[in-house]
Amino acid sequence: MAKQQTEVRELQEGSYVMIDDTPCKINSYSTAKPGKHGSAKARVEAEGVFDGRKRSLSQPVDAKIWVPIIERKQGQVVSVDGDDMQVMDLETYETITMRVPEDKDVSPDENIEYLEMEDQRKIV
C-alpha cells in the first residue's frame, strides 16, 4: 500500500490519514493541551475517501501515524454502458473500467479528474 509515516501534530484539515486501514480525508483537527499526567492529545474527524464513512481518531500529538499517498489523475471518458464507464488515463493511455457516480452525469469524450490509490479509484 502506498503510504508514509508522519507524526499526528503534522496533520492538517483537508489532508489524508489512514484510519482503520482506510484512506480518509480530514474534516476537523483539534488538540487538547497537555495535562498533569501526559502529553497533548489530538482529535481527528475524517471521512473515508472511497467509501464515504465517517471515522474519528484520538492520539497523542507525538505518536506516529500512516498517511496514504493518493494520486490525482486526468482521464477521458471513452464509453458509458449503464453503471460502468471506460476511462482512458491521459498520461499512460491505459483504459480503466470505473463505476459512474450516482450524482454525476458523464458522457463520452468528456475529461474527468479522479483519485487513485492502488486499485481504488473515485471521480472528483
Image: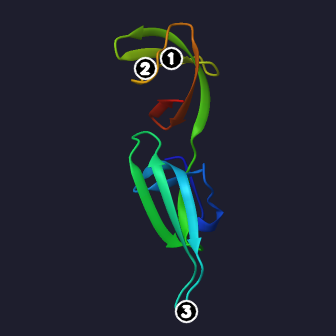
- The Cα atoms of the two marked residues, 3 and 2, are separated by 55 Å
x, y percentage for residue 22? 43, 50
Q: Are marks 2 and 1 in contact (CB under 8 Å)?
A: yes
Can you say whether 35 is above or below 94 in the image? below
Which one is in front, 58 or 84? 58
- The Cα atoms of the two marked residues, 2 and 1, are separated by 6 Å
Q: Do the residues labelled 3 and 2 touch (CB within 8 Å)?
A: no
Type of the residue with mark 3: Lys
Ranked by sequence position, the earlier of labels 2 and 1 is 1
Which one is in front, 82 or 97? 82
Quarter-of-image position of residue 36: bottom right
Disc 3 versus disc 2: nearer the observer: 3
Q: Which residue lies furthest to the bottom in this view?
A: 36
State the residue position of label 1: 87
User: Which mark is on residue 46?
Assistant: none
Check disc 3: other Cα within 10 Å, few if <14, some if 14-19, many if 20+. few
Ranked by sequence position, the earlier of labels 1 and 3 is 3
Say left or right for 84 vs 58. left
Check disc 1: other Cα within 10 Å, few if <14, some if 14-19, many if 20+. many
User: Which mark is on residue 97?
Assistant: 2
Q: Residue at x 48, y 31 (%)?
A: 122
State the residue position of label 3: 36
